[in-house]
Amino acid sequence: MRRAPDLRLPLVMLGIAGLGAVAGGVRAALLEPGRSSLLGLIFTAWMPLLPVAVVAAFCLWLARTSPGAALGGGVAAALVAALYTFELLHPKYNQDANIGLGLYLMLGWLFPLGPAVLAGGLLGALVERLRGRPPTAPTDARPLPPLRPWLWPLLVPGVVSLAVSAQPFLHLWERGLVRPDGLAPLLLSLGTTSAGQLAVSLSPALLALLVLRDRAGRDGEVRPRLEAFWGLCLGLAAALGLFGFGQGLLRAVPLGAFLLLCVLLPVLGYGAGWLACRRPKS
């Protein structure tokens, strides 16, 4: 029988990183009592988890062949994320615009979490070999479903994420602020920003893809899980579009309700996709 993906490692990673974010938010609130609200603390607690989710998806995949490397890399990345976030949330970095935290949210999965997961993974793989349990290929009763049908749903949130990333640069272009001699650095900045935001935006879908595809191969229910994944990706695309282009709603909707809606859309999409396939046909 195929074993279900072990979600304990991603949950532990998110928990460790979340503790650092919460501690940093509480410290900021204590140092500046009148500036941070409870809603602000909640917001800062989950936003820095997005780069960790990218690494968690990689570790979930790596655990199929080398659990030791996945454990070492995942824990190392989570510890670095907790320390990094705790420091970046200090009020001295967060006066007007916390550029460091913004860069971390987009590219933190690459640095500093990339070197951390590499070093921790090598150490975990070494310990695994010393204990006499070398990495082995997974022995599954059934092969995994073809990957291509599971990649198509990712195009929808991917396109929306790229559109959101390009929005500030398009505004500069429309205002005539882009000069020919500054086009190359602008394109480099656009590519870097788009790649970072794309990885972070798709991280929830990547985690879901690994879990749902593995379970589909385990129980043979490919279509319901694939349609649920389609619904999740469509909901994620709607959430990204709302977050990127729907800022005008903040004038009529409280920030808490706005953020809650962005979080609920992928969940509602997943449920709608699952129910649509389960509904009996007339």
Image: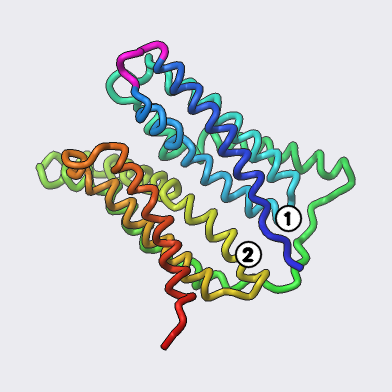
Q: Is residue 179 visible?
A: no
Q: Is residue 124 above or below residue 1?
A: above
Q: Which residues are magenta?
A: 30-36
Query: Is residue 153 shown in magenta?
Result: no
Q: Which mark is residue 99?
A: none
* Identity of the residue drawn at 30% across and 42% down: 257
Is residue 89 shown left or right of residue 134? left
Q: Residues within 10 Å of mark 1 (few under 14, many from 20)?
A: some
Main SS, magenta residues: loop
**Residue 44 sits in quarter:** top left
Q: Describe the element under mark 2 as helix, strand or loop.
A: helix
Q: Which residue is mark 2?
A: 214
* Identity of the residue drawn at 47% across and 22% down: 24
Given residues 28 and 72, the one toward you in this image is 28
* Identity of the residue drawn at 66% across and 40% down: 73
Given residues 58 and 48, the one toward you in this image is 48
Q: Which residue is mark 1?
A: 65
Specify the amino acid type for callout 1: Thr
* Identity of the residue drawn at 44% across and 39% down: 107
Is residue 282 shown left or right of residue 4? left
Specify the amino acid type for callout 2: Asp
Is residue 146 shown left or right of residue 44? right
Q: Earlier in the sequence, mark 2 or mark 1?
A: 1
Given residues 11 and 240, the one toward you in this image is 11
Which of pointers 2 and 1 indicates the residue nearer the eye?
2
Of all residues shown, which one is farthest toward the top?
A: 31
Query: Is residue 34 shown in magenta?
Result: yes
